[in-house]
Image (cartoon, rainbow, N blue to C red):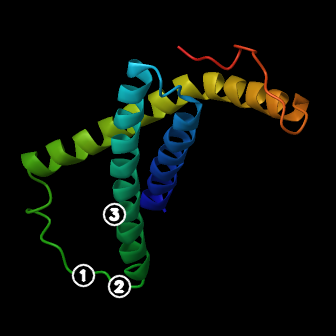
């Protein structure tokens, strides 16, 4: 499940970057560079998402494996402790990042919903409230 959720975030970010590039004025050299960067990042994110989905499917298929015997001495070593501590720290970093971004992302989502709902078919808005720094 964890890998599947990470895959969904990666795929969602890739889609948002791809859609964002439609707003770029390709007559501007900076926009052309931005588009290239976002396209490369989106490809990488889609690849990562596919790999994460594959891992999630494999993990899900292994859920019914019987518990195997383990050597307690082999899994209670400093390198095991260090690896697991890094994993937990990475989860904490991700949680803090998501918590910090959540309020801004919700505000952006509300602004986009308002803008999309306020547009007549074919109309465009000059409203800059969607600009994010």
Residue 116 makes an appearance in the image: yes
Residue 123, percent from left and from top: 84, 30
Q: Residue at x 51, y 36 (%)?
A: 21
Numbered disc in front, either 3 or 1: 3
Q: Quadrant of residue 99?
A: top right
Query: Could you tell me which residue is drawn at 41 percent across and 46 percent down?
Result: 42
User: What whole-number distance in Å separates the C-alpha atoms at marks 2 and 3?
Assistant: 22 Å
Secondary structure category for the residue under label 1: loop
Residue at 40% over, 36% down: 38
Residue at image mark 2:
65
Q: Earlier in the sequence, mark 2 or mark 3?
A: 3
Q: Are marks 2 and 1 in contact (CB under 8 Å)?
A: yes
Residue extending furthest front? 27
Badge nearest the viewer, 2 or 3: 3
Say whether disc 3 or disc 1 marks the residue closer to the N-terminus.
3
Report x, y in % for residue 104.
62, 22
The numbered dot on residue 133 is none
Q: Say few, some or many: other residues with alpha carbon within 10 Å of mark 2 (under 14 / 14 to 19 / 20 or more).
A: few
Residue underneath mark 1: 68
């Amino acid at each position: 499940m964890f890998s599947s959720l990470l895959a969904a975030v990666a795929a969602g970010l890739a889609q948002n970057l791809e859609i964002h590039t439609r707003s770029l004025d390709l007559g501007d050299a900076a926009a052309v560079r931005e588009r290239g960067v976002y396209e490369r990042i989106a490809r990488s994110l889609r690849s990562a998402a596919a790999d994460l989905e594959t891992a999630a499917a494999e993990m899900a298929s292994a859920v019914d494996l019987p518990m195997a015997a383990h050597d307690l001495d082999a899994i209670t070593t400093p390198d095991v402790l260090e690896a697991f501590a890094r994993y937990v720290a990475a989860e904490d970093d991700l949680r803090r990042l998501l918590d910090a971004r959540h309020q801004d992302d919700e505000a952006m989502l509300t602004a986009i919903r308002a803008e999309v709902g306020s547009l007549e078919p074919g109309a465009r808005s000059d409203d800059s409230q969607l600009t994010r720094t």
